[in-house]
Amino acid sequence: MTQVDIHIQRKAYKPGAPAAIEDLHLSLAPGEFVCLVGPSGCGKTTLLNLVAGLDRDYQGAIDIGHRQGAAPVIGYVFQNPRLLPWRTVRENIDLALPGDGGADVDELLRILGLEAAQHVYPQRLSLGMSRRAAIARAFAVEPDLLLMDEPFVSLDPPTARRVRQLLLEVWGVRPHTVLFVTHDLREAISLADRLIFLTPSPTRVVAEVAVDIPRAARDQEKAVEAFRQRLTTERPEIGHLL
Ligand SMILES: Nc1ncnc2c1ncn2[C@@H]1O[C@H](COP(=O)(O)OP(=O)(O)OP(=O)(O)O)[C@@H](O)[C@H]1O
C-alpha cells in the first residue's frame, strides 16, 4: 500500500495556452480508495495521464511511494478494457505480470468470476466480463497505485453494479491505493473512502468529502442515495457542479 502526493502547479497543452490544471494538490493515504468527481472537461483524464507518467509536460511533482530510482508500478483501467484480441483472458493477464512475481492470478480469476472464461478470447466476452478481465490484469501487477478512468461507463446499470461489487471484493483482499475517475456521484459514493470534486477551467479541487457509509452497506442503493441527497443539499457547490 502506497502513499501518493500530487502537486501540479501548472499543466497547459501548448506553450502560452491557458492552463488545463493549475494549483492542484492531492494526497492519497496508503490503501485509500479515492474517487475524483467532476463534469466533462474538468481535467480528470488529463490528471490521470500526468499521474500515470503518460504525459510528463507539466510543472509540479508527483510522488508515488517515495520510490528512489525505481519507477512506481501503476495499474491503469481505461474506459475501453484494451485487451489484446489475439490473446485469451489468461494470456492477457499473464502478459502484464512482472518477471519477478505479481499477484495470484488464479485467486483474482476466482474472485472476479472469470475462472470458466480464462481461456476465452476477448471478442467472445460480454462487456461486463471484459471489464472484469481488465480489473484482474490491473490487480495482477500489484500496483503501487491503481488508476481507473470511468471504467464502467458503457455498462448497463445492473452489470455496472455487479462489476463494482466485484471490484470492491478484490480491493478488500488486495487493498491497493486507488484513484478512480467518474462523473457519476452515486458510483463514487458506492466505492470511495473519500470523494474529491473538481471544477473546470482550470481544474481545481472544490470540495473533499469522506464517505461514512459502512463498507457492508455500500451495495444498498437507499444508503447511497440518502448520502447523495444529504451531500448535494448541504453542499450546494457540489450540486451545481454535477
Ligand atoms: N490533447 C489535448 N490538447 C488540447 N487540449 C486538451 C487535450 N486534452 C484535453 N484538453 C483540454 O483539457 C481540458 C480537460 O480535458 P480532459 O479530457 O482531461 O477532461 P475530462 O474531465 O477527462 O473530460 P471527459 O469527462 O469528457 O473525459 C479540456 O478543456 C480539454 O479541452
Image: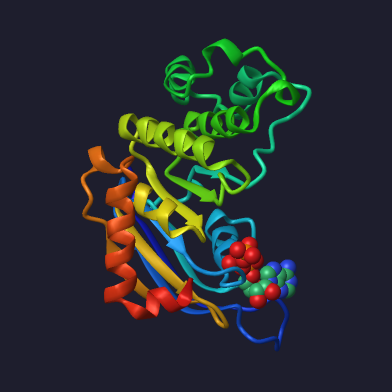
Q: Residue furthest right?
A: 86
Label total for image: 0
Q: Position of residue 10 (x, y in %)?
A: 55, 79
- Identify the residue shown where x is 65% and y is 12%: 119
Quadrant of the image occupied by residue 80: top right
Going by the image, does 126 lie left or right of 77? right
Q: Nearer the viewer, residue 242 or 203?
A: 242
- Identify the residue shown where x is 72% and y is 21%: 124
Q: Nearer the viewer, residue 226 or 95?
A: 226
Q: Position of residue 209 (x, y in %)?
A: 29, 66
Determine whether 149 is above or below 120 in the image. Answer: below
Quadrant of the image occupied by residue 19: bottom right
Quadrant of the image occupied by residue 173: top left
Please state the quadrant of the image where ligand 1 appears.
bottom right
* Observer able to see residue 71: yes
Q: Position of residue 172 (x, y in %)?
A: 31, 33
- Identify the residue shown where x is 35% and y is 74%: 207
Q: How is the image coloured?
A: rainbow
Going by the image, does 33 lie left or right of 145? left
Determine whether 72 is above or below 43 in the image. Answer: above
Q: Residue furthest front?
A: 222
Going by the image, does 160 lie left or right of 219? right
Location of the N terminus (image quadrant): top left
- Identify the residue shown where x is 60% and y is 15%: 118
* Observer able to see residue 56: no
Going by the image, does 16 lie left or right of 191? right
